[in-house]
Amino acid sequence: MNGPTDIPNAPPLVDTDSILSFAVALGLGLLIGLQRERTSDRMGGIRTFPLIALFGALTADLSRNPGMGWLMLTGLIAMTVLILLGNLDRLRGNDDHTGITTEVSALLVYLLGAFLVLGDKTVAVMIGGTIAVLLHFKPGMHAFVKKLSDKDLRSIMQFAVLSLIILPILPNRTFGPYDVLNPFAIWLLVVLIVGIGLGGYAVYKIVGARAGTLVSGLIGGLISSTATTVTYARLARTQQKATPLAALVILIASTSMFIRMFVEIAVVAPRQFAAFLPPLALLFAISLCVCGFAFIRIQHRENTMPEPGNPAELKPALIFGALYALILLAIAASKEYFGNRGIYVVALISGFTDVDAITLSSANLASAGAMPVDTAWRAMVIASLANLAFKVGAAGFLGGLPLLRGVLALFSIPFVAGLAVLWLWT
């Protein structure tokens, strides 16, 4: 006679998935309720929100039974009625409280409990954590918004136009000569560059105008190393004592250019990133050493960072997009007619004004198999050396002879190292 353990396909005694759903609902409700309890809101707190989450999970679980699909919607209606009843004083005008954060949170927690049963638990946990964080950081978020100027808000909205309005409507296929112009891909990289600049601008707004020398150079390089060079060259012209500091900030901004390159390569050619890394990382490390040595000698720990311009302006974005497209065409044409030497000439010319375009185009072609990685990183190094030469000239022209001497002294080692890598690296 067979025992109980021998019964084939015996159903599990306990539905562990349901238990997990209810347990997670309870935990998320406690987390959000804990935060609401600290606000002294009369509607709900550490006990109410776990109950709401369990209510949502229970109605969703029961609604899976035949003929019970209406139950979850009924529960949502019941929650809405309870919230309205709890706010009768406010509706009658007897309460000065005007916010509805707790009420909206209660409805979300109900739906969150239901989603834990019917949907993806990982997504539900992420949503619940996001709700708790948004509720907790209300004072800081309000303070941050109050600090935003019209210029800051315009930057955010312009970035939204670039990324959320223009990008989705562009065709995602290649056009034109050599079949290398993809409007969607080109604009996506424009969004990437503007996003990096906007991130640097956000850091500037957080740290304020009073920032350390290292931070000033790093932020300036993330936003625009060329613009930082021009700004500090003018500062050195008007304040002779600031010349060593200006030279150092220009070097740091130029060094942080490698950070932008690493991000761009990782986004555009993630599979080839490891092949790009060694020569570029070596040059980055050498530049960092020069920055550290110069920083120790100058001993300037703090300075006033001039406010950068709006990194999300539409005109520079259009110019960069056009430049990137032209470089794609130039690389394709030069490769067909002149081989690798033609690509290096394009990198040299484009590097005088911008390194991002040649970095993105070379990485993109390497990712597609249209250019060897060795050729691509050499084009990037040539462009970066050309950019260093341009900055030396701009610093001397705008900042005067003392700044020219300082920048030459600091840039000479990274420049020679770049030439050596091009010559000796195999």
Image (cartoon, helix red, strand yellow):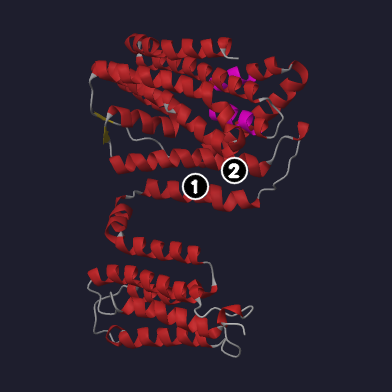
Q: x, y percentage for residue 321?
A: 60, 36
Which structural element holds mark 2?
A: helix
Question: Which numbered disc, 1 or 2, marks the residue closer to the eye?
Answer: 2
Name the residue furthest front.
1
Mark 1 neighbour density, 10 Å: few (under 14) some (14–19) many (20 or more): many
Q: Is residue 94 above or below residue 276?
A: below
> Which residue occupies 28% across, 20% down?
295
Magenta segment boundaries in residue numbering: 346-364
The N terminus, quarter of image: bottom right
> Which residue occupies 34% across, 71% down?
101
What mark, if any, has residue 188 been given in the picture? 2
Is residue 273 covered in magenta?
A: no
Q: x, y percentage for residue 348?
A: 59, 17
Disc 1: which residue: 159
User: Which of disc 2 and disc 1 is earlier in sequence?
Assistant: 1
In this rendering, position of residue 136 left or right of residue 367: left
Q: Count the labels in the image.
A: 2
In this rendering, position of residue 420 left or right of residue 25: right
Q: Is residue 404 above or below residue 228?
A: above
Mark 2 neighbour density, 10 Å: few (under 14) some (14–19) many (20 or more): some
Closer to us: 376 or 331: 376
